[in-house]
Image: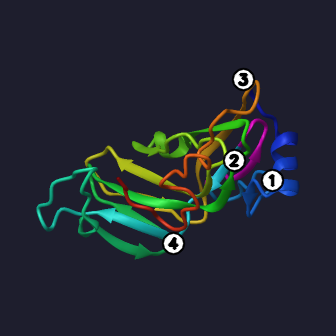
Amino acid sequence: MGVMPDTWIREQAVENGMIEPFVDRQAREGVISYGLSSYGYDARVSDEFKIFTNVDNALVDPKQFSPTSFVDRKQDVCVIPPNSFALARTVEYFRVPRDVLVICLGKSTYARCGIIVNVTPLEPEWEGHVTLEFSNTTPLPAKIYAHEGACQFLFLKGEGACEVSYADRAGKYMGQRGVTLPRL
C-alpha cells in the first residue's frame, strides 16, 4: 500500500471529482494552509459548527446521542470552551476510489495550540463532507478559523480493489452533507 503523490491526487480530483472544490496549490499567505501538498491534501473547515454544551446536564452516549448537547453556529471563527469540543465539516466533498483508503491527521498549527483534530479513515467508495471533531485540550478558550486549513488527508492505494466497499455495505454515513451527528 503506497501513499499517493500530488500528481495522482490532482488527476483524481480534476478528472474524477475525488475532491470538490479542489485547490491545486498550497494557500498559505495569512491563513492556516490548505490545498494540494506533496503527498496529501489539506482540507478546510467550513463555517458550520456544533459546539458541545452541557447546559442540560446530559450524558454523552454514542448509542443515544442527544442533539441538544450542541449549540449550532454559522460563523467565521468558532470559540471552543476549555476542555470541550466542537464538530464541524470540511468545505470539500470527497469521493474515495474503490482501491483507496484515506487517513486524516490534524494540522500541526492547531496541535501546537492543544487543539486536536480527529477523523476516522475514509473507506473505499465512501463519499461526503467529512465531519471533523476539534478537541480543546487546554484550560482556555480556543479559536478555530473557518475556510482555513484544518487537517491533512493522505491517500493510500491498495494492492487491488477491496471485495466489499463502504458503498456496497450501504454505510450509515454515506453521502453525508453538513455536520453529521453519531448514528446507530
Residue with the mark numbered 4:
76
* Image spot of residue 144 (x, y percent): 47, 59
In primary-sequence order, the first of circles 1 and 4 is 1
Name the outermost residue toward the left: 57
Q: Is residue 53 above or below residue 137?
A: below
Residue with the mark numbered 1:
13
Residue at image coords 37%, 56%: 183
* Image spot of residue 61 (x, y percent): 22, 51
Q: Is residue 70 above or below residue 83?
A: below
Q: CA distance from mark 1 to mark 4?
A: 26 Å
Would residue 33 be counted in the magenta stretch? yes
Circle 3 — which element? loop
In primary-sequence order, the first of circles 1 and 2 is 1
Q: Residues within 10 Å of mark 3 (few under 14, many from 20)?
A: few
Q: Which mark is residue 1?
A: 3
In primary-sequence order, the first of circles 3 and 4 is 3
Give the left or right position of residue 174, taking residue 57 as reference.
right
In primary-sequence order, the first of circles 3 and 2 is 3
